[in-house]
Image (spheres, coloured by chain):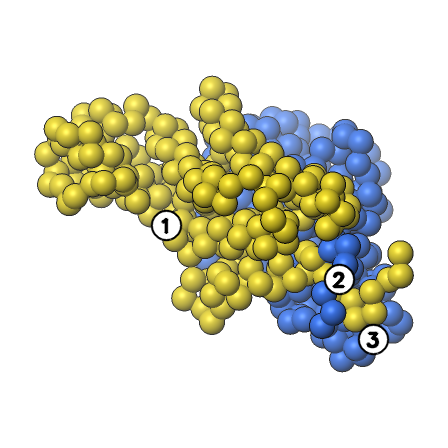
Chain colours: A yellow, B blue
Amino acid sequence: MASGAEAEGPTTPKSPAGANHRRAQIIESASRLFDQVGYYPTSMDDIAQAVGIAKPSLYHYFRSKDAILLGIHQEFIALLLSRQAERGKPSDGAVAPQLYEVMLDILNLMHTHRGHVRVFFEHHRELPPEVHDLANQGRDTYFNSVVQLFEVGVDKRQIHGNPRLSAMALFGMCNWAYQWYDPEGPLSPEDVAQSFHDILLNGIAVAASPE
Amino acid sequence: MASGAEAEGPTTPKSPAGANHRRAQIIESASRLFDQVGYYPTSMDDIAQAVGIAKPSLYHYFRSKDAILLGIHQEFIALLLSRQAERGKPSDGAVAPQLYEVMLDILNLMHTHRGHVRVFFEHHRELPPEVHDLANQGRDTYFNSVVQLFEVGVDKRQIHGNPRLSAMALFGMCNWAYQWYDPEGPLSPEDVAQSFHDILLNGIAVAASPE
């Protein structure tokens, strides 16, 4: 998850790569604890112990539990934004396959970052305002890039409907999976993305209404 | 929200209608506090004070904060189940308008019970197992009744697709609204239900795929 980091011992890393790796370790351990034990009952002591570092060392990376929660969020939003950037401009090519990619990206998170996603969705509102605003910036950027995809599709007459409401439908279907999707179950993220994409594009009615 | 209850003072009600009313008052006040202040920071003292009753009186109705959270859930699930029961069997008539009704019921909750819904979705996992199981019973009953609606529609060849995944798509679209829907905003629950129902049934593609 950290970029260019090798395995590190519990001492304070000297290199930037080592520091990134340590941040990623903390985020990983904290996500697991928040997911299993709950956000409120987990203390900074618990997190330091799970990572295997001293508490001052933990505070060197994150000055509070809220900062770790923000870090958790920034990690998965950065992942979604980088996937979006890799795809290039929404005006290139057909919109439908790009919507599939967006849906798959989110459903893949339920596989790789389910604890992160859940913890963030369920606790972001209780973050201090300045941390909350920082988290919202990333979310808004991502949300708007998806709305833009719907807007381009409507402009090109490939799809119809209100772009914001269509985006809310897409996010609803995919984000809600954090409540029910079982990474150990029979459905892959691709299976779910395929089904939901088909619903979003074509609906489930056997005889489509004429208008 | 309470059945057949008149306005009551802060003394312990004598009649069953009065007791129902008092329970509803507690649930209402607690939902508001949980929503505004957070579930964890809110104490039984805070709730008693908000309702305007003594703490022993509060414990007479609910033996813990968890029990109030369960009460909050049972209230909105009961509402959804009663709406479902009013509609009769899913085999009666076309499935599409029944799906609209289900979606509208959930979106109406975002208007009338948004705090209840949010608090429950975000904290149910941390409930003690026995309380959690009780809450799940109600949710399972409701979820299965909606899956059954999709099954009937598939049997009658009115709709296609996997009934469970279609139900997950419906719940995702509608439940997620608790994260973004603004009851004071320009969209009514009917507007959102109509748009989402149209997506669910007909999709947004301008040229529907031929299969």
Q: Chain of mark 2?
A: B
A18 or A66: nearer the viewer: A18
Q: Looking at the rendering, which quadrant does residue A206 occupy?
A: bottom right
x and y percentages locating residue B90 in the rendered image: 81, 71
Q: Residue at x 87, y 73 (%)?
A: B92
Q: Chain of mark 1?
A: A
The amino acid type found where label 3 is placed reads Ser
Residue of label 2? B208
Name the disc covering residue A75, or none: none
Q: Residue at x 83, y 65 (%)?
A: A208
Name the disc covering residue B91, or none: 3
x and y percentages locating residue B43 in the rendered image: 50, 32
Crowd rating for badge 2 (residues with CA inside 10 Å; few <14, some 14–19, many 20+): some
Q: CA distance from mark 2 to mark 1?
A: 44 Å
x and y percentages locating residue B84 in the rendered image: 79, 62
The amino acid type found where label 2 is placed reads Ala
- Farthest front residue? A92
Crowd rating for badge 3 (residues with CA inside 10 Å; few <14, some 14–19, many 20+): some
